Image (tube, helix red, strand yellow):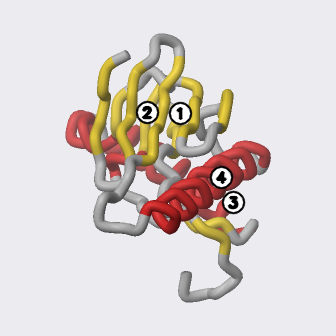
Amino acid sequence: MHIIKRGAEAVIYDVGDAVLKYRVKKGYRIREIDESQRRRRTKREARIMTEARRIGVLVPRIIEVKEFEILMEKIEGKRLRDVAEELDEKTLREVCTKIGESIAKLHAHNLIHGDLTTSNFILRDKEVYFIDFGLAFRSKREED
């Protein structure tokens, strides 16, 4: 098991055929509040990813959810951030169209990803997978 990425909210581990997202402790918060928030955010992220997958958005399949952890399918591919400049114009347009269509599906079901950056899309065989739903939430507000 080795670290793939370390972020402000979580550490992502490669565990062979899967990826483990562990939501880290925040030492500046009261322990009970920290645990409650981490537990709630972990459950919310897993629920939103599961619903996104159900409506046809490509996301990693959830294998198991624990208190502060999500074990999910490993998507073999490259982050859009790392390959966007290498794509020809036609392919880039196709990728962007797929992203837009998936965002429309999410929003039609009141799901907001919350962190749509090129780092949070993985390209695999011209398919676009959405990752990192750590800031995702539900909303019917048009502004969101």
* Residue underneath mark 3: 105
Tag 4 and tag 3, C-beta contact below 8 Å: no
The amino acid beneath tag 3 is Lys
Look at 22% across and 34% down and name the residue there.
86
Q: Secondary structure at mark 4?
A: helix
Amino acid at the residue labelled 1? Glu
Q: Which residue is mark 2?
A: 123
Considering depth in this image, is 8 or 106 the residue closer to the camera? 8
Q: Amino acid at mark 2?
A: Leu
Residue 142: name its quadrant.
bottom right
Q: Earlier in the sequence, mark 1 or mark 4?
A: 4
> Mark 4 highlights which residue?
43
- Mark 1 and mark 4: span between their CA atoms? 26 Å
* Residue toward you, 136 or 87: 136
Q: Is residue 15 left or right of residue 103?
A: left
10 Å neighbourhood of mark 2: few (<14), some, or many (≥20)?
Answer: many
Question: With respect to residue 110, does 70 lie above or below?
Answer: above
Q: Amino acid at mark 4?
A: Lys
Q: Is residue 91 left or right of residue 6?
A: right
Residue 138 x/y as whole percent: 66, 71
Compare marks 1 and 3 and give the one earlier in the sequence.
3
Q: Which residue is mark 1?
A: 127
